[in-house]
Structure formats: C-alpha cells, structure tokens
Image: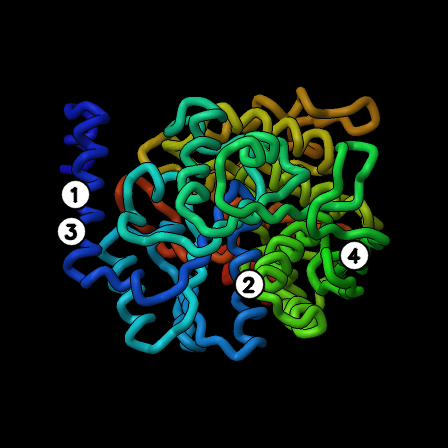
Amino acid sequence: MKNYLRKILPQSVIIWTHKVRGFLAATIFRMPAKNIRVIMVTGTNGKTTTCHMIKEILKAANYRVAMATTIDFEINGKKTKNLSKMTTLSPFALQKFIREAVNASCHWLVLETTSHAIAQHRIWGIKPKIAVLTNITHDHLDYHNTYEEYRNTKAKIFEMAETSIINMDDKSASYFLGTDLKKIVTYGLDKPEKRPTKPDIFAKKIILEPTGSLFTVITPESQVAINLGLPGKFNIYNALAALSVGVEFKLNLELIKMALEKVTSIPGRMESINLGQPFAVIIDYAHTPDALEKIYETLELSKRGRIISVFGACGDRDRSKRPIMGALAGRFADIVIVTNEDPYSEEPVKIIEEVASGVNRGETKSNRKVPGENFYKILDRRDAIEKAFELAQSDDVVLITGKGAEECMVVGDKKIPWSDRKVVKELLMKRREE
C-alpha cells in the first residue's frame, strides 16, 4: 500500500503525512526527548563509528548513555542489534526507544541521524544539544536530487543545535561556517597550506599504520598523543569529531584519550576475520564512492599481495554512483568481483551491469581488467565470496563491502536472512576441512 500511495500522491502530501506521524509518535510517548540531552551525528560516512566513539567518551566520564546507530542500540550498557535496515528508526520506534532511555535515567542520547530521517520528520520533537558533521559526499541523490539539497537537509539539525561540530576539511564546511549557527567548533588535520586558518581542534604528527594510527591532537587548551586502534585517515577524522564533543564538555583530555584508544573494532567497519587462512579478509559497510575509495587507499598503505574486491550496489537507490564505484574498483583492486547486494525491487543483474560498466573505465595501463581473469560478475553473493577465496593467495586481501554487519538482504519487499560475516566464517571453515 505504501509503495502504491507513493506513486499516486504528490511529494508534498507524502511529506505532510510523515510530519503527522512524527508529531503523533512524539505525543504518544510524551515528548521523551525533552528529558534527555541529545547528540545527533550526521554525514555521509563515518557516522556509526563516530557515535560509538562518543558513547565511549561519555561512559568514561560516568554518564549513563543511550545510543542508536545503523548497526546497534544501547541503553545504559544493554545492547541489541539493529535489524530494521534503517539507520534512524521510524518515528514511533524511535520515540519508544527514547522513552526507554529516559526511563533508564540516561543522561545522553547519541543518535545517528540520516538526511532521510530529517526530511521525513522522523526526528520531530527531538532537539539536539550538539550536532556533529562527519562529511558530505556523493550519496542519496536519487532522493534529494542535488548535492546542495542533500547538504541543506542535513543542515537543518545544526540550525536547532546549541553547538555545531564541523569537519573543516570537508567541502561542505564553508557552507556551514557561513550560516547563522549558535556556536561552531571545527576540527580537521593540520593543513595550513590548504586553508587560511586552522580548525579549533586538529591532528598533527600523523603516522598511519596497517592496524591503526598515531597522532597528536591540539586543542585550544592542551594537547595529547593518541594511539588509535582503527586504521585509516578517515578514522582519525571520526576520532577528532568524537574528541571535539568531549572537549566541548570540558572533559579531561587523558580521559578522552583512554576512551578513544579503547575502541579497537566496530562490527562491519574494517572488520578483519581471521580463521587461520593465509590471506586477509576484511568486511566493511562502504557503499558510497567516497567510503570505498578511502578503504582502498588505507589498504594500499600496507599492501603486500593483491586486493580482491567483492562488492555491488543497492537497488532503488542513487544509480549515478554505481559506475563510479566500479571505476574505483577497476583502479585500486587487482581482482574485481561484482555481485548482488540489496536489489530491492530492481533486477540484480541490471544493477551488477551498471556497476561493472565503470570497471574498465577505472583501470590503469598496469592494472587492466580482463573478464574471466581478474574481472568477474557473479550474481550469487555467496558464490562471489567463495570465488574470491579460491583466487586468494598468501598475503592477498579479500575486501567485501556494501553490507558490513547487516543480517539480511532485501529482495523485492522481503528481508532474506544474510550475513557477510557468517558466510565468510562458514566458507573459511569449509576450506580448513577440505
């Protein structure tokens, strides 16, 4: 019925119904957000990791914390998985969660917040004390039409916030810094040659390693060296965003350092699975060009063998990014395997072909892609992963992206049980037994 109504009703009417649902949900659960301080984290990539980092900092400071992200929920230490396939829940589920957090006497709610949730009024009645921006890159243009509309939608939560924490190195920073926000705290890397002023909080003396990074953070009041257990420059940005929240609360930098160094893994985010195989296997949620490129660049730092990339694209979503992701795989990966992901109502083969169309565009003279040799299109995702393992040699990295820690695949209007993590473990165990 929902899909049918979307086809016949104008968008203005649909948005109105969303707003009514948001209002009703907040009213039925007695406006619970008024009784808890809210931190909203938005952006294209890095939201989930940043939320987990903020949660650890707040817990280290002895706050009772609730958190809702793409992969999980937590209320004062009690954790459950997010099986909804929604980053920000429907208004009724969200308001119920907040009411439970308030009843558990939580001081803070860390809420991963999407542009869809903002546009569809799922967060009606929830005013953030702090809003955090990770980055804004190519995504969801099927819904928002343009990058500017996508960016402006996210900006709405910053207009409500008492403090806005902005990534000064993101291309959207100038827009946010030019708006009339109540208080702005900026973060970024130490790059004086690329901008006229430094961020309020920045990282310098950066050393990137295969399993993490070392860097020094400079704040207006002090500085601290951090040994982060998550790899990639993008995770330094996530850590800076979370650290900026702690600095805004005037928490001790050593306490913040301790909390950040405690975060050594996030399910489905650069997650390594090792069952004794001679090659590495990494699972990640990356489903945008920017996220995929950053992972490839991170793997390049420690590359000893080949990169075997298994990925696809989501159906009923921004089609323009599909060939871009294919081109990135063609450029960075030594072996490319394009497969099924979450087709929704689209034909999986059609999605695969659109992604694959970009692979040869991205290839280099030294890294040509030849179908059947180092470039494959395999419809069944399990078969695609198994093919990657068959091709993998010692010191290679098999990178499986797009689903991360998700536990279902959406085909049509049905959720089919699926877990990259479980399938990987099953196939690796099978290889050990053969």
- Work out whether residue 401 can be spotted: no
User: What type is the residue that disc 2 sits on?
Assistant: Ile
Q: Is mark 2 in CB contact (under 8 Å) with mark 1?
A: no
Tag count: 4
256 displayed left or right of 131: right
Q: Position of residue 164 (x, y in %)?
A: 52, 47
Q: Quadrant of residue 433?
A: bottom right
- The earlier-in-sequence mark between 2 and 4 is 2
Q: Which residue is mark 1?
A: 20
Give the crowd class for mark 3: few <14, some 14-19, many >=20 residues within 10 Å. some
User: What type is the residue that disc 3 sits on?
Assistant: Leu
Which quadrant would the N terminus be assigned to in this image? top left
Secondary structure beneath disc 2?
Answer: helix
Q: CA distance from mark 2 to mark 3?
A: 30 Å
Q: Which residue is mark 4?
A: 210
Q: CA distance from mark 2 to mark 1?
A: 32 Å
Q: Quadrant of residue 121?
A: top left
